Image (cartoon, rainbow, N blue to C red):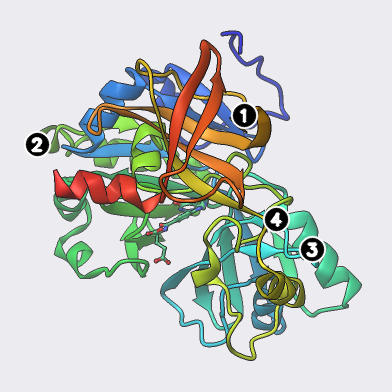
Amino acid sequence: MADASLFPTRRLRGTPFTNRVQAAGVSGYTVYNHMLLPTVFKSLEEDYAHLKQFAQIWDVSAERQVQIEGPDAHRLACMISARDLRNAQPGRCYYAPITNQNGGLLNDPVALCIAPDKYWFSIADGDLLLWVAGLAQGLNLNVTVTEPDVSPLAIQGPMAEDLLVDVFGPEIRDIKFFRFTAFPFMGRILNIARSGWSKQGGFEIYLDDSTLGGTLWDAITAKGNAYNLRAGCPNLIERLESGLLGYGNDMTSENTPLEIGLDKYCALDNDAEFIGKQALLRQRDSGITKKLMGLTLAGPPMSPVSMPLQCKAAQSNVGIVTSGVYSPDLNDNIAFAMLDITAAELGNTITVETMTGSVDAKVCEIADFEARLKAR
Ligand code: THG
């Protein structure tokens, strides 16, 4: 794709942190939920190496919240979520695939139970609000469905915890994975969760007042030097190594959780009810016909995949590469690929048509990337 800047208009929303992100030298953005999401600062590889060693501050405001509040909030949250939220507890986060009536994925948010009658679905790129508000309207539910003024700011990397202890106090250490606690800040109460879209450890701070964006950013960066803090963003190389899937890239509404390996987050073996469950049960019975797999590709270090690459076996199409890039730490080109089940066998060799020609690629489990890194 051509390198050109994004023309700013009202439709393309900035965030409470955009001026700080600009000042920190952002060099690439994507558009996510109609909002700017940084993709690169120094370079993909430099950002990646730094993230694995130190601490980074990420403007992930584009992970917007779909807030469901009111007497029917719990009922609606359970209805839309393939993840069993029947016993959801305040202070907990749940990775929650959202499926339509055919089992097709509409989003893969993190659901936060704020109170028994209040949920936030911290969404990936997709207009989930329209689906949820439409259901509330059509079913005449007693809820309000809104996008509140809430912007997550992530602190990620092995030094993230020490940094946030410096800023918010030692109680930060008590936050367990996928839980959140309220911390006072400038007269407001911020929910801080141990979570984030990397496997390097870290936190997400849910800022609920845009006017405090600069103040919050500055309060954290003021303590940053001791931890070699830099501005960063979700990193393509790190997230592929870590097996983190991106909605819109690695899955769309054409895919079900079974096809992308998210079955373990779906309540298929109990009596929880959610939209899409019957379709998923039918698909589980009949068997999936395609599956998201890992791939390692031969050839020189490859550039990030910006368009799906065709996969072939014996000259016929067997699927597409959905995301791919060179991993310095694995010294391998790694990718996710949606493959026909006939080609999705471990160890199978296929051909991938890259921008620079055809290369051999070997099928593996997505989890193999992380396992190989740990075994080094
Ligand atoms: N944080 C918040 N909102 C988000 C994301 C986030 N919205 C968009 C996107 N990321 C949603 N997708 C994911 C995918 C994976 C995870 C979180 C969000 C994740 N998974 C862990 C794993 O795979 O090991 C743990 C899941 C679990 O055990 O429940 O963290 O990052 N606010």
Residue at 70% in and 55% down: 106
Residues at discs 3 and 4 in contact (Cβ within 8 Å): no
Amino acid type for the residue under numbered disc 1:
Pro
From the viewer's side, name the closer residue of 197 and 89: 197
Q: CA distance from mark 2 to mark 3?
A: 45 Å
Q: Residues within 10 Å of mark 1 (few under 14, many from 20)?
A: some
Of the image marks 2 and 4, the number of the one nearer the N terminus: 4
Residue lying furthest left: 226
Name the residue beneath numbered marker 1. 308
From the viewer's side, name the closer residue of 276 and 189: 276
Amino acid type for the residue under numbered disc 3:
Ala
- Where does the image place residue 191, in percent across and percent down from the top left? 40, 62
- Where does the image place residue 172, in percent across and percent down from the top left? 22, 62
**Mark 2, secondary structure of its residue:** helix
Q: CA distance from mark 1 to mark 2?
A: 41 Å
Q: Which mark is residue 133?
A: 3
